[in-house]
Image (cartoon, rainbow, N blue to C red):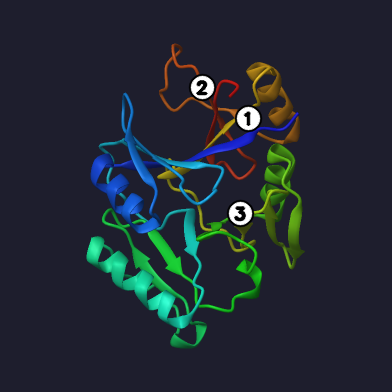
């Protein structure tokens, strides 16, 4: 049994505004739910984006960001222009012009990159080409087993995985890994398939190196909060 990636979830000070930014940029449908907002893909992507409220301000670089792909140089510029029009800003993280990618921040400061055309690593992916993470080789191995996504890169302690169905890759840059200073602002929600057992999946993930954690979620929630081997929070939802 492996879980499915259900959503990439953002803690947001203004969930509606952030959902509408990403919905407009990606061309996905925005749907309100009981506590926040979700984006439903329109391009065949198999996971959603979710945005839920927090009072905590963003205090440093995220452990996770998106790499958006481009079909042509003009396409890259159109994506950047559209993002800026929607409320993004340019961000300097030490990148050089020779690298070619353009680093932006969404309206709440969450970093993302617009990758130039011709990037071989992202050639077989979606508009969200990669869910790019700061993390160790071991955590790449963990998520490969957790999701059943094969390794498509494993070199110099850098790893990447991709669903057998294609779409976005998930990648980890290896050492040095930035120290974790608090709860991540972006986390993964995963779910075992219908007809399986949530608790059995939690126990399987523990054998792979995860652990249960308490972030104040209480006892009445339907999901289980865990941390991967690098300490990054994620949630195991009920089967779906």
Q: Position of residue 171 (x, y in %)?
A: 62, 57
Asked if one can make out residue 131 in the rendered structure from this viewpoint, the answer is yes
List the residue tagged with mark 3: 167
Could you say which is closer to the camera, residue 11 or residue 94?
11
Q: Secondary structure at mark 2?
A: loop
Residue at image location 31% in from the left, 50% down from the top? 58
Asked if one can make out residue 133 in the rendered structure from this viewpoint, the answer is no
Seen in the picture, residue 82 relative to 14 is either above or below; the reply is below
Q: Position of residue 70 (x, y in %)?
A: 49, 72
For this view, does 91 lie left or right of residue 69?
left
List the residue tagged with mark 1: 211
User: Do the residues under discs 2 and 3 have CB atoms within 8 angstroms?
Assistant: no
Q: Nearer the viewer, mark 2 or mark 1?
A: 2
Could you say which is closer to the camera, residue 117 or residue 130?
117
For this view, does 172 lie left or right of residue 185?
right
Q: Which mark is residue 223?
A: 2
For this view, does 156 lie left or right of residue 75?
right
- Nearer the N terminus, badge 2 or badge 1? 1
Q: How many marks?
A: 3
Q: Nearer the viewer, mark 2 or mark 3?
A: 3
As measured in the structure, the alpha-carbon distance from the residue carrying label 2 to the one carrying label 1 is: 14 Å
Residue at image location 45% in from the left, 78% down from the top? 95
- The N terminus - image quarter: top right
Dividing the picture into quadrants, the one containing residue 16 is: top left
């Amino acid at each position: 049994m492996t879980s499915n990636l259900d959503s990439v979830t953002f803690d947001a000070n203004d969930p509606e505004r952030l959902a509408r930014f990403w919905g407009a940029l990606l061309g996905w449908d925005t749907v309100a739910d009981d506590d926040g907002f979700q984006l439903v893909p329109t391009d065949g992507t198999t996971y959603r984006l979710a945005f839920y409220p927090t009072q905590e301000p963003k205090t440093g670089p995220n452990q996770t960001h998106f790499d958006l792909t481009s079909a042509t140089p003009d396409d890259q510029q159109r994506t950047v222009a559209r993002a800026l029009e929607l409320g993004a800003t340019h961000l300097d993280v030490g990148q050089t012009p020779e690298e070619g990618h353009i680093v932006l921040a969404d309206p709440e400061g969450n970093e993302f990159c617009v990758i130039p055309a011709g990037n071989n690593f992202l050639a077989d992916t979606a508009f969200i080409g990669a869910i790019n993470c700061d993390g160790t080789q071991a955590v790449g191995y963990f998520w490969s087993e957790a999701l059943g996504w094969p390794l498509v890169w494993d070199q110099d302690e850098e790893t990447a995985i991709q669903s057998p169905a294609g779409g976005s890759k998930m990648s980890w840059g290896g050492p040095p890994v930035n120290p974790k200073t608090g709860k991540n602002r972006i986390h993964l929600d995963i779910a075992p398939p219908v007809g399986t057992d949530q608790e059995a999946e939690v126990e399987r993930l523990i054998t792979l190196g995860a652990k249960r954690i308490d972030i104040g979620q209480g006892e009445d929630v339907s999901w289980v909060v865990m941390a991967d081997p690098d300490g990054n929070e994620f949630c195991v939802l009920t089967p779906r």
